[in-house]
Image: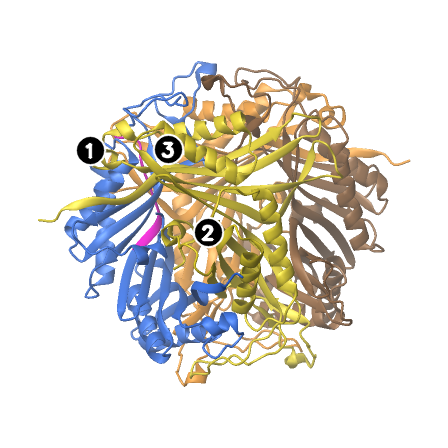
Chain colours: A blue, B orange, C brown, D yellow
Amino acid sequence: MTNVILGKNQYGKAENHVVRVNRDSDRHTLRDVVVSSQLRGDFQAVHTEGDNGHCVATDTQKNTVFALAQKHDVASPEEFLLTLSDHFTSSFDWVTGGRWAAEEHLWNRINDHDHSFVQNKDEVRTAVVVTDGSKRTVISGFRDLTVLKTTESGFVGYPKDPYTTLPETEDRVLSTDIATRWRYNTDDVDYDAVYEDVKKIILAKFTDHYSRALQETLYLMGKAVIEAHPEIDDIRFSCPNKHHFVYNLGFCDLENNNETHYAADRPYGLIEATIEREGAERADEVWAGIAGFC
Amino acid sequence: MTNVILGKNQYGKAENHVVRVNRDSDRHTLRDVVVSSQLRGDFQAVHTEGDNGHCVATDTQKNTVFALAQKHDVASPEEFLLTLSDHFTSSFDWVTGGRWAAEEHLWNRINDHDHSFVQNKDEVRTAVVVTDGSKRTVISGFRDLTVLKTTESGFVGYPKDPYTTLPETEDRVLSTDIATRWRYNTDDVDYDAVYEDVKKIILAKFTDHYSRALQETLYLMGKAVIEAHPEIDDIRFSCPNKHHFVYNLGFCDLENNNETHYAADRPYGLIEATIEREGAERADEVWAGIAGFC
Amino acid sequence: MTNVILGKNQYGKAENHVVRVNRDSDRHTLRDVVVSSQLRGDFQAVHTEGDNGHCVATDTQKNTVFALAQKHDVASPEEFLLTLSDHFTSSFDWVTGGRWAAEEHLWNRINDHDHSFVQNKDEVRTAVVVTDGSKRTVISGFRDLTVLKTTESGFVGYPKDPYTTLPETEDRVLSTDIATRWRYNTDDVDYDAVYEDVKKIILAKFTDHYSRALQETLYLMGKAVIEAHPEIDDIRFSCPNKHHFVYNLGFCDLENNNETHYAADRPYGLIEATIEREGAERADEVWAGIAGFC
Amino acid sequence: MTNVILGKNQYGKAENHVVRVNRDSDRHTLRDVVVSSQLRGDFQAVHTEGDNGHCVATDTQKNTVFALAQKHDVASPEEFLLTLSDHFTSSFDWVTGGRWAAEEHLWNRINDHDHSFVQNKDEVRTAVVVTDGSKRTVISGFRDLTVLKTTESGFVGYPKDPYTTLPETEDRVLSTDIATRWRYNTDDVDYDAVYEDVKKIILAKFTDHYSRALQETLYLMGKAVIEAHPEIDDIRFSCPNKHHFVYNLGFCDLENNNETHYAADRPYGLIEATIEREGAERADEVWAGIAGFC
């Protein structure tokens, strides 16, 4: 006779869209974050007995997100998630951990105006806090930062088999949507400052070398981040190779010297890699629930 | 016995994603446009007889888009669409008009680099050319420029009926995604320069007054554009009122003085209006197939 | 000196997601509709004076949608929109018309259960009521009904020009997402019954002939609908030609007799046509704000 | 001095959209699958040396997907992915594993026609094969099967804290989009038959009990699957609680006895759980890269 048991589980309220304005001076500021809260711990009876005695309502989690945003402001997505984690794990004995995540929409002032803003959609900032007992891990990142080089990229020297038709090229367009997350080994971090610097390093690295494959470029980006930031132990990328095919115009006798491209949607290359500080503690289990690509 | 006839129709190839790089100097430039081509004219027999003698293949239209991008470059979306329109109406007797549209993705240089770019996603630039015989109409615009004011907006004085529960407020967050299109009365236009200026006027106008309703703000934006640009005869807006509700935290005795908001997705207000130069020729039929909101 | 004036405008609350359960018997039913309400009339002062005296709040429109759903139930999307139209135009002198639209999500019973349902996502049902003074027009339709034929479709006999590279074919896959809307010439209609029959006619017509072009197939579908339904005066289609390219496997010496296809996303053909009852009254202005493709 | 090293990585071609028609008889069949291929193994030099000697081109992976679809047909998504896995791991010494995934779009015949089909969008079928050396793991599933009960669901007995405002209810609408994946402990499986049966069990279980929380319902679904299918060792769910709020119509003196609901988009509950066969071998590392929610 089969015994069936409950395995890993988590639950909560996802995508609470909080816009927190700070009006302490006439020069307003705002943080615009979409926050998800999920609790882990002893939720056995909720599943197997229909007993909700431990089931902190997802509605309560929502109320808490907004109340703590009001009470403590949102200094950064990371600090706000740590506040949520501490609240839930200290308020309920049986909540031994959880996963709190935020996506931040960024805003710029319009003409340096005190209270008028235009959204900066170039990328979405991300943050996750994973708590397991007394261990809190912070992972920051961004997604959808789209970059493109019109030259200084090629792809040669790859294996040829009966299914290979791709011609080698020493000059091509290279484009990707950068999605990256990095893990801190401390919580003594100025999260906004590190965010800006990591983004700056990644953009600068994209421009500074001849790319022999997107793999090489991602590795160089990650290496530069790890070397510049001792508080970061590993960084992951999951990036499409957004193909820009040179449109063959031979049919109408037009030369096309890498000028007119067809930008394809699907399929696309997909390159995923981790770059790590040698000797640092691994955190595979934490990564699994976040950017768990392998 | 019923007679059934063919009414208005158009067809073509939609969403050709063209990335045109100009490599004439080491400082590369690019235009990234998603182009749709649709032909109008005598296509009766294609529909009613299965006779494709007049049916310029949509595949041919695609090839033409890429070939003309290579041949003439893409000086601006508007000029490129005019080139397409002229090509098709002059190449085929029975093509008496059509609709050509582009959405342009914008790119900034990374650190002023010669050939490395990062996509600017703040808005999508749009352009449409509608041709009817010898009459070509150009309509430019943009969509998804998201703006927000943290104060200097209110809503009072509206009618109260048995279904009215909204309290009046003299201080609220106002936010919208600006989608706008404007129609030129000439084709002697520096399209890129006008685009930049219209966007600048609209952003500046958003900041400069106390908004008594989104309707008023849209009207003021449109009025400023028409007054500054004699080459524009009308401008349309279709803009959501993106509600930011002050989260009621009375249950936990927290004051919330317009600081912590819940940003709702649906439903949303939807405000659509045309602002026109008095006495200018109307173009309702052209608008109908583009931003045909009424 | 330029005079700037307000042109066409409308406003309201968009995408109110109403799920109306009827529990009058143990065998529950439900209608799941996303309803948009937009008013037209004298809204001059809202725009130009910041005077909201005529501005029926979009929040009031939302409350009204839910209240009338409760009061009158939702017999069909069309009847519910007519109820909304009558309510607003009779309640406010200055509201002389408007546009009310619904998208209906469809549900099937699970195993004929009394109160458990599974969503049928094959298509989305649509309805629009446009009111102008005492004239109410009802337009019904659906979108995203995806069909495919593996044979009995070809494309030959089209013009060849210097940009034509497409080879003729007498056997190809034909696939499209059917989006259609039809206009009634009466409001004495069993909307649910006609909906089912129109969908049935369109699906049957898709199967019953060799298609020489998507244009021909759409025309035949529309013709069959007009002939079967005297209460319908015109019908419009806006349908992509979803290309399924036979993958060329010559490189590895595999034959591919229209078996293995690459289904492309963009670009796609886009075929739009109106099929009309000869002699019927036209309604171009109504169509303009709904499916205003030309 | 910091040493930076390459960690976990994988790469390939994502979202190859294959439509494989079988025309062996006049009664055609088709499988419509979006296939992603990602390789794992020794790809160190690609990243750190720019040496592509081991870098099987993603374009080659694409060609292989289409060629093997032609050569072997697509008997089921799972069998096709196993074929791909065997091909790549046997063709290249340094490819020691990988991840192959498919999303299948389902089609029904139109009126039992031999070669005309309408897409069934009720759910998307999914499959993943993860290979690590000689160990191949098959995980099947589906997503976006949307279900709803109009009664026989409640939520009571949960903890009340200062942030709790949710009233208890013994009668509410319960709705979710079911996303589930299950892992086989053998590859001697009739994948199509098991798929149909698991879906049937899950739908039936949704209807057959009073639900005291979505957690309980998911657990009961999973338990029924594990008990009925000895070839399945664990099953995971990730399901939103799609809130249907009873619209408060007290302002206009209308009773609303769970009839008129506002269906909210965000935030939503998010319930994730694993149900397992006791004593079975765990596969946390495999799950991490697939539905790695914790």
Do the residues bearing badges 3 and 2 touch, measured as CB atoms within 8 Å?
no
Q: Is residue D245 above or below residue C274?
A: below
On what subunit does the disc labeled 1 rest? D
Q: Of circles 1 and 2, which is in front?
A: 1
Query: How many numbered marks are there?
Result: 3
The image's mark for residue D154 is none
The quadrant of the rendering that contains the C terminus of chain C is: top right
Q: Which residue is mark 3?
A: D89
Residue for badge 2: B144
Q: Residue at x 33, y 61 (%)?
A: A128
Which badge, 1 or 3, comes first in the chain's sequence? 1
How far is disc 1 from disc 2 in space, using C-alphas?
A: 42 Å
Label 2 CA crowd tier, 10 Å (few <14, some 14–19, many 20+): some
Q: Note whether D227 is above or below C274 in the view shown.
A: below
User: Is residue B273 part of the magenta span, yes or no?
Assistant: no
Is disc 2 on the same chain as disc 3? no
Q: Which residues are magenta?
A: A141-153
Q: Secondary structure at mark 2?
A: strand
Chain at tag 3: D
Q: Tell me if residue B134 comes above or below residue A236 in the rendering.
A: above
Q: Amino acid at mark 1?
A: Glu
Tell whether C248 sits left or right of D13.
right
Q: A238 or C52: which is nearer to us?
A: A238
**Which residue is the site of mark 1?**
D49
Instruction: Inspect the image, locate mark 3, and give the three-letter code of the amino acid beneath it.
Output: Thr
* Nearer the camera: disc 1 or disc 3: 3
Q: CA distance from mark 3 to mark 2?
A: 46 Å
Marks 1 and 2 on same chain: no
